[in-house]
Image (cartoon, rainbow, N blue to C red):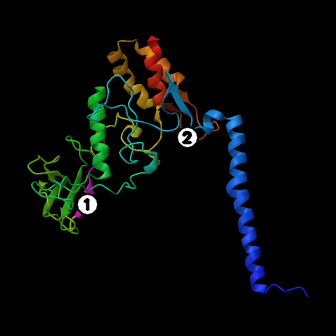
Amino acid sequence: MKEHVPGWLRVHLAALRALLVLTAVTGVIYPLVTTGVVQALFPGKAGGSLIERDGRSVGSALIGQSFTDAHGAPIRTYFQSRPSAAGAGYDPMSSGASNLGPEDVLDVLAVPGAKNAAGEPDTGRQSLLTKVCARSAAVGALEGVSGARPYCTGDGVGAVLKVFPAVGTPTRVVSANQACPAKPFIAGYQGVPVECAKPGEDLAAGRTVPVRGAARAVVPADAVTASGSGLDPHISVAYAELQAPRVAKERGIPLERVRRLITDNTTGRALGFMGEPGVNVLQLNLDLDGMGR
């Protein structure tokens, strides 16, 4: 007489068989087939779009990198990439943005002599606005143009006031991002003298008032903000054109020749209408290095 398998066991055995079959199909067979097809049809892209020079890999066409010296200063003979918030910069294992939005305008000022939780000297925290202002000032100095922007002070921090009381007639106004003894970017607000900020003072009770100045931004937005992934290898055509005179001068080559290289390394809009044209910085710099070959 044939022994009957209990119903509950049959259900579990069927589930186990389904698990094994689906694991083999979706976890082994499908990845191997798709990988093999892609490797055969698009070997370069399947391998990470790596770029090689003189027999060694120098990077990927899909991931940006920095062109700075050992101290983090820009190498003047190269085009510079946009900022990156991925780890220490362009780290594929830490891809992502800063997650700071347009309302992040208040710095946490460093308190002289104080230490943080790790026992290291207190360095405070820059707001997104101050990071943008500082980057713009640095790019302006590097390229020999104005680094001024609306909502930025002349010393490269966010132009933000804290007004007390938060509601009603002001009796006290503080330039929140300018630590004493800095001179406030404006002398007064609604008839009240503006003070510099005292590091460590709690200004939370005040009303936050960003102040738009008359400056017109010359430095493009992508020169002062990171991409969503932190890995974008492209910069705008405007940012590349801004850097072209410096690179041409430092390398001693005609400016028009550098501009032709920018055009050669400019990609169009996705599908012809999405996004903006971009310039691949790594490929552009490699072409610069290869001009004398």
Q: Nearer the viewer, residue 69 or 149?
A: 69
217 vs 192, left or right, is: right
Q: Amino acid at mark 1?
A: Thr
Q: Nearer the viewer, residue 98 or 1?
A: 1
Q: Residue at x 46, y 14 (%)?
A: 291
Secondary-structure class at tag 2 = loop
Residue of label 2 = 275
Q: Is residue 251 magenta?
A: no
The segment highlighted magenta reads: 207-212
The N terminus - image quarter? bottom right
Q: Residue furthest right?
A: 1
Residue of label 1 = 208
Q: Is residue 211 magenta?
A: yes
Determine crowd level at label 2: few under 14, some 14-19, many 20+ residues with C-alpha closer than 10 A: few
Instruction: Report, in whole angstroms, how far the alpha carbon at label 1 lies from the one at label 2.
Output: 34 Å
Location of residue 60 in the rendering, given as x and y in whole percent from the top left corner: 51, 35
Location of residue 261 in the rendering, given as x and y in whole percent from the top left corner: 49, 20
Secondary-structure class at tag 1 = strand
Q: Amino acid at mark 2?
A: Gly
Q: Which mark is residue 10?
A: none
